[in-house]
Image: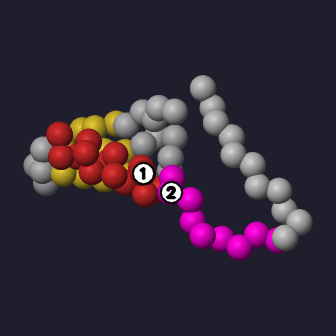
Amino acid sequence: MKFRVVVEKDKLTDRWSAVFPEVPGCASAGDTEAEAVENAREALALWLKPSKIKFPSRARILELSVP
């Protein structure tokens, strides 16, 4: 699965931001464009990491993938 990341330089702070339009709230930044992209990759991985949640014993847990 691929995600778009919007990377742009902020003239006021002179830093780079990285925002995922399809993943609200998942964003990062860096002093360079490359650092912002690498930090964004880490942020996305943490955002998508499954959390340890107890499910009811009768619940079916399925995994889906999208092209």
Q: Residue 67, how many percent across, how many down?
A: 60, 26
Taking the image as shown, residue 15 lies to the left or right of residue 27, namely left
Residue behind mark 1: 45
Q: Secondary structure at mark 2?
A: loop
Residue 10 visible somewhere in the drawing: no
Task: Pick out the residue farthest to the top.
Answer: 67
Q: Is residue 56 above or below residue 47?
A: below
Q: CA distance from mark 1 to mark 2?
A: 6 Å
Taking the image as shown, residue 42 lies to the left or right of residue 32, namely right
Amino acid marked by disc 2:
Lys
The magenta stretch is: 48-56
Q: Which mark is residue 49?
A: 2
Q: Residue at x 42, y 33 (%)?
A: 4
Q: Is residue 49 above or below residue 3?
A: below
Nearer-the-camera pick, 7 or 66: 66
Q: Residue at x 71, y 73 (%)?
A: 54
Give the crowd class for mark 1: few <14, some 14-19, many >=20 residues within 10 Å: few
Is residue 17 found inside the magenta-colored segment of the image? Answer: no
Taking the image as shown, residue 53 lies to the left or right of residue 32, namely right
